[in-house]
Structure formats: C-alpha cells, structure tokens
Amino acid sequence: MDNQIHNKNIESETTIISPIELNKKIPISEMGKSNILASRKIVNDILLKKDSRLMLIVGPCSIHDIDAAKEYALKLKTLQEELKESVYLVMRVYFEKPRTTVGWKGLISDPDMDNSLDVDKGLHQSRELLSWLADQEIPSATEALNPITPQYLADLISWCAIGARTTESQTHREMSSGLSMTVGFKNGTDGNLNMAINAIKACSSPQSFLGINDKGQISTFKAKGNKSAHIILRGGKKSNYHIADIIECEKLLEKNDLAERIMVDCSHDNSNQDYRNQGKVIEEITKQIVSGNKSIFGLMLESNLFAGKQKILDNKNDMEYGVSVTDGCIDWEETQSIIRNFSENISKKLS
C-alpha cells in the first residue's frame, strides 16, 4: 500500500535564483531604464490616441536562438528609424509558450530544447537578451504565462500580452492588474470576446493576490489596477478581423463602458493557422484604417529571419538558423515589404 500523502507525483525539486539575485547579476542600465520608460510612454500614448502612429508587435513566434534574435532586432531597429513617423515597432520577444497538450515550453523552461528544464539558465539568457535590447533602444513585447516570471523580467518589458488560453484565468487577471506596462488580452481560442472584456475590467480594478517578491518569498500584493489594458482579436472558430467583426467588437467595448481600443493579431486563427496569410490580414486592416477606422491602434505579426518553421532536432547544429521552432513565420524580406506598404498607406491618412 502506498502511504505517501505529499508530493506523490513529484519526481524532483530544484531551487532557482531569486529575482533580486538575477537582477543584481544582470542589472538594467540607466540607459536601458530610460529607454524602457520612454517606450512604455509611447505605447500608452498610442493606446490613448495621444500619439497618432500605429503600433506593430513584430518578431519571432518564440525566441530559441539568442544570436538570431539579436540579428533580427537590429534589422527591426533600422526599419523603425526609416518609418518612425507613421509606425512604432515593438519586437516580439516571447520566452514562454502555452501548449495545447505537450511540446517545447519556451526558452525559460527549456533553453537547451532537450527537456533538461534548466530554468535558471533560461532566466539568465532571457534577462541578458532583454537587457541588451533595452540598451539598443529596441522595445520588447512578451506574453506573461507563468505568474512568477514577471518578477524576473518585467522591468525590461514595454508591452505585455495575456494569451487566449489564460485570458479567463483569475490568476493572470490579478497579476496583470499590478504590471507596470500596457497589457493586451486575447479573445478566447473559440473566438469569445466577452472573456477578454471581463479580463480588461478585472485588470483595471484594484486586486489582491499571492505571488513572489524580489527575494523569492511568497507574498501578498495589493494592486491599484492597470488602466492600460486592451483587447486583441486573434480569431477563433473563424477569423475576426473583417469590418463586421471590428464593429461588433467596438459595440461590445462601448456597451461595457470601455474605450474602443483594438489590436489585431494577424496570425493564429486570423491567418487560418497559415503564416503566409498574414499579409492578407494586414491588407484588410489597412483598408479599414484608410477608410476611417479609429479603434484599431495596433497589429501583431509573427516574423523571423527566414520563413516557415522547423522541428527541434537532437543535434542542434543540424537545425536551420533564423527559422521558428513553434508557429511558422514570414521571413524578413516579406516583413519589410508588408510594414513598408502599411506605413505608406496609413501615412496618407495620418498626414
């Protein structure tokens, strides 16, 4: 008879570095801090329509190769400088991947992509990349999946998403109420908008919740509420970026006394799970903005150095450089073309 009453299904336990220790090892520089604060203000000003530009969250579906991520980031920075009058580019820097069943869970959980689960190494690599990006004046966007990881990384993030699988989670709504940057909530995987609406309300309200502090101690937090929250349309059983879908979302936001602030995810179910369709989505959104839409303030694109996706191989040296290991991405050449066309078309509206 098995009499074990505690940790019956736990195979091992490993203590990791505390947030304050990691932050001391990889501190944010004064330049990085200044750049993060400036980028957060720009993001929020675009959300509030104090800044007339459109925001684009652009980058790899997930980060698995730091060198490739840095190469991509510098290309994005050059494009930002070229198009700075009409668009504001924020790099997608996703370290955590929600899985429907099983699969690689991202750089933080498994940096070596071999199920060794060296979280300590993953956190170090993630913070080092974010710190470098901040010093380069390249703003970062990520998804807050595990409610503990923001203590390690959130000071280096300019915009944050709550994914379709966690938008309905009370834990994530509470955590978001205490975050210091703009937060976007995706509609549910089935296309349900109401759970995102409810999440925005919860996030913007005062909340009390459990978490860890900088020392890694279990603590209770009282948050004032994060007023910089918005909805992200990512499709569901069908796409939801066409004009009728946008109008429906606007009406729902208005009905709930929420500002009509909408971001459209050009990937996932809006692209019918085919990365090659993202350009079609952005074309449709461009038409709506040029025709007078006032509610769409941002877009999301999954993009990498090279197109498509690849399997994770036992021999990492056999893997293709700059190709996604999660969702398929468009390549850099198409990314530039899409964003330049978007910028050119909306510039006429902005001028």
Image (cartoon, grey):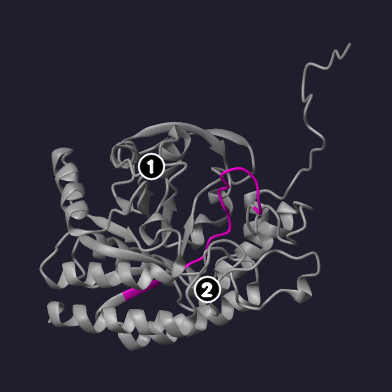
Which class describes the residues within 10 Å of circle 1: few (<14), some (14-19), or many (20+)? Answer: some
Q: Residue at x 67, y 48 (%)?
A: 18
Residue occupying image coordinates x 75% and y 51%:
117
Q: Is residue 281 above or below residue 104?
A: below
The dot on residue 133 is 2
Q: Is residue 89 magenta?
A: yes
Q: Which residues are magenta?
A: 88-104
Q: Give the x, y percent position of residue 134.
A: 50, 72
Residue kind at label 2, given as amino acid type: Leu
Magenta-colored segment: predominant secondary structure: loop
Specify the quadrant of the image occupied by residue 11.
top right
Residue holding disc 1:
190
Counting from the top left corner in percent of width and height, residue 172 is at: 46, 40
Amino acid type, residue under disc 1 in the picture: Asp
**Label tally:** 2
Which comes before the other along the chain, label 1 or label 2? 2
Q: Is residue 57 visible?
A: no
Relative to 340, does residue 159 appear above or below in the rendering? above
Q: Position of residue 276 (x, y in %)?
A: 43, 71
Between 187 and 347, which is closer to the camera in this rendering?
Answer: 187
